[in-house]
């Protein structure tokens, strides 16, 4: 994606939404207006953090296949929209009471973090039944119409506004950003698939067939190999097979 130097539009959230954080130079989101339109730079100089929220400066965001499908019009999405849900960054501000990682530890300013695509409400019937991924009030980074109070809702921005209740993990400084950014979607998808598969057949010593050598296939090949499996990958495209 080419980001041209443009004069951004400015949006500011209302004061009623929480603790005000000013970002200088202003946070900027690349906003997608719909099929056939270029991404537009929108300045978000002020963010309102509710208790438990965090503001993260993005280090790197990767483009998921679903971002590409959305822009090409292959799947419907509400607009205006800040795409991107695979990213890594550093916490620069915290809402009242601070935010916590999934292991219950308080997040510090400056800490490097990755987080889940989905934010479950934690209160609805499905959340209470242990199905947060099917939450009735589910919100997803990079998938929600840009709205007042949650302008920085995707990874294709200088900063992302992390909502209270988002599963978040601190990550070490010596891991490359290129490895960390896809953790919330591609890597998580493959990890879940291999976890389900290994519940049936242990991966160590197993023969694993992977159909498709895209991002998911390559990740699955690496993770299954690491777990001791013999891996066969099929793909009709020679360059992909080579990768
Ligand atoms: Zn994705
Ligand atoms: Zn819920």
Image (cartoon, grey):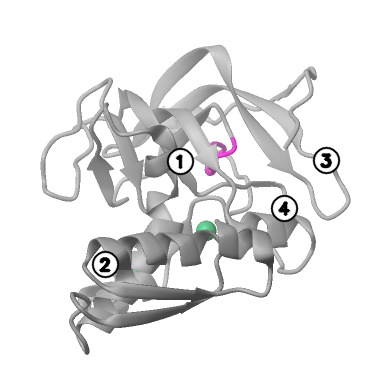
Q: Main secondary structure of the magenta part?
A: loop
- Marks 2 and 1, Cα distance to the nearest angstrom? 27 Å
Q: Nearer the viewer, residue 40 or 147?
A: 40
The residue beneath circle 3 is: 38
Which type of secondary structure does the marked residue at label 3 adopt?
Answer: loop
Residue name at image x 25 percent, y 26 percent: 111
The magenta segment: 151-156
- Residue tagged by mark 1? 87
Residue 152, image x, y percentages: 54, 36
Image location of residue 101, percent across then percent down: 19, 43
Whichever of labels 4 and 2 marks the residue nearer the N terminus, that label is 4
User: Quadrant where the C terminus lies?
Assistant: bottom right
Question: Looking at the rendered structure, which numbered label has been put on residue 123?
Answer: 2
Looking at the image, residue 83 sits to the left or right of residue 224; the answer is: right
As drawn, the residue found furthest toward the top would be 24
Question: Would you place residue 206 above or below residue 88 in this image?
Answer: below
Select label 2 or label 1 by which is in front.
1
User: Which of the two discs, 4 and 1, labels the residue nearer the N terminus?
Assistant: 4
Residue topped by disc 4: 79
Give the image location of residue 134, x and y in percent: 38, 75
Of the numbered discs 2 and 1, the one sitting upstream in the chain is 1
Tag 4, which secondary structure?
A: loop
Up/down of 58 relative to 63, above or below:
above
């Amino acid at each position: 994606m080419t980001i041209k130097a443009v004069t951004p539009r400015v949006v500011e959230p209302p004061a009623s939404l929480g603790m005000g954080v000013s970002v200088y130079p202003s946070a900027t989101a690349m906003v997608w207006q719909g099929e056939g339109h270029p991404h537009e730079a929108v300045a978000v100089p002020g963010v309102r953090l509710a208790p438990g929220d965090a503001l993260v400066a993005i280090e790197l965001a990767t483009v998921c296949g679903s971002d590409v499908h959305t822009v090409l019009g292959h799947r419907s999405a509400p607009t205006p929209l800040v795409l991107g849900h695979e990213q890594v960054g550093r916490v620069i501000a915290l809402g009242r009471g601070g935010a916590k990682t999934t292991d219950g530890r308080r997040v510090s300013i400056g800490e490097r973090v990755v987080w889940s695509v989905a934010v479950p409400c934690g209160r609805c019937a499905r959340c209470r039944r242990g199905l947060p991924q099917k939450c009735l009030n589910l919100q997803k980074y990079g998938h929600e119409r840009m709205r007042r109070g949650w302008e920085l809702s995707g990874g294709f921005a200088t900063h992302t506004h992390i909502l209270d209740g988002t599963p978040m993990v601190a990550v070490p400084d010596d891991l490359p950003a290129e490895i960390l950014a896809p953790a919330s979607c591609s890597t998580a998808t493959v990890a879940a698939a291999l976890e389900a598969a290994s519940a049936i057949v242990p991966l160590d010593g197993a023969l694993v067939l992977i159909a498709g050598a895209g991002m998911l296939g390559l990740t699955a090949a690496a993770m299954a190999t690491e777990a001791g499996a013999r891996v066969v990958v099929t793909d009709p495209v020679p360059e992909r097979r080579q990768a």
